[in-house]
Image (cartoon, rainbow, N blue to C red):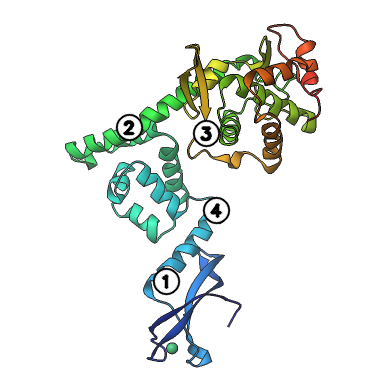
Amino acid sequence: METSTLIRKVHMDCPLCDKTHEVEERKRFATIILKGEEVTYEERFYFCANADTDENEFETGSMTNANLLNARNAYRVNHGLLTSDEIVAIRENYGLSQVDLARLLGWGEATISRYESKAIQDEAYDTMLRLIKDNPLIALEFLKKNAVKFSAQKRAEIKAKIIEKLDSYGKEYLTRQTFEGEYADFEEPSEANGFTILNIDKTEAVISYIAENVSNLFKVKLMKMLWYVDAFSYKLNGCAMTGMVYRHNTMGALPVGHYSLMNLEKLNVHEEESYNYEAMLHVYPTKGMDYSILSADEKKIIDKVIKKFRDYKAKDIIEYMHKEKAYIETKPGDIIPFSLAKEIREF
Ligand SMILES: [Zn+2]
């Protein structure tokens, strides 16, 4: 027997020795030929200690299916194709049945069902699935193209589901476009953006990450903390993290496009009234935010900034920033160059 690991012992009717006893469920790496290619995957099987060594292993039907699914998914990962789980997720995200999604894409009715359980999709099919995954507008196009495959009622039902996705997608797209538009003058790496082109995904992740770790986070304090994250990153690595450009403001550094920044659909920002009835923007973490875009080193930088300023009130961090060279040597409205930002005091 090749190297295998015991997962658990199961009391069951053993088909090898015809007795009811404890059978070992084990796993090991196995290889299989799929589409003419050797694929390594994890396989599970049962082991009977009573049986002869030449036939002491068996699989149940569902085990065999799961093993094959693992093998196919290993092939998919090797080839950059969507896994069966990812295909299920795309379908469920639209709230569609297997048959409806297959019809929507103009495929045979059983195609999606096969991809979710039995077969590996071709590259072209994979591309189509990815297209609708990232863009409901394209799903809507497919619905138009394959309209005859549905009854009028079914078509209306599916259209409603896609439009629901489109609403949230559309809002997110528009808010990103607006924010990005503010950076039209900063499309090249320079001292203004810390030699980093604006990265909205990363900016959103940084903001949510800070909000996860700082309670009562309001806009004014967040703006300064973002500047310190970028300044600190520049000081260590010679490039900023988010790509935002900051101006000298009486309250310290303020990113270009800060109004549209706070409107980004993915951020969790709430307007709250302060004691003097001024509207204040309270920033909360975003549920389900993907932090994988932040490297371990980047998280270390953000953690350091959080540790330093976590308990600062807005006016404390403003005062602290007022003593930075970056503030003293620039005038109101000036862009704060990262050549000055990197002179921040040690903390
Ligand atoms: Zn047995």
Residue at horizontal 44 percent and vertical 63 percent from the top = 69
Instruction: Indicate the position of residue 285 as horizontal and vertical percent values.
Output: 52, 34
Instruction: Tell me if I can see residue 202 in this picture.
Output: yes
In the rendered view of the protein, which quadrant contains the N terminus? bottom right
User: Label 3, label 1: how many angstroms apart (C-alpha)?
Assistant: 41 Å
Do the numbered discs 3 and 4 sit on residues whose CB atoms are within 8 Å? no
Q: Earlier in the sequence, mark 2 or mark 1?
A: 1
* Residue of label 4: 79
Q: In front of the other: label 2 or label 3?
A: 3
Marks 2 and 3 in Cβ contact (< 8 Å): no
Residue that mark 2 sits on: 164
Neighbours of disc 3 within 10 Å: few (<14), some (14-19), many (20+): many
Name the residue at 53% across, 60% down: 74
Frontmost of labels 2 and 4 is 2
Question: Where residue 194 appears, x then y in whole percent?
Answer: 73, 23
Image quarter where the C terminus lies is top right
Query: Label 3's element?
Result: loop
Label 4 residue SS:
loop
- Amino acid tagged 2: Glu
Disc 1 residue: CB within 8 Å of ligand 1: no
Q: CA distance from mark 2 to mark 1?
A: 38 Å
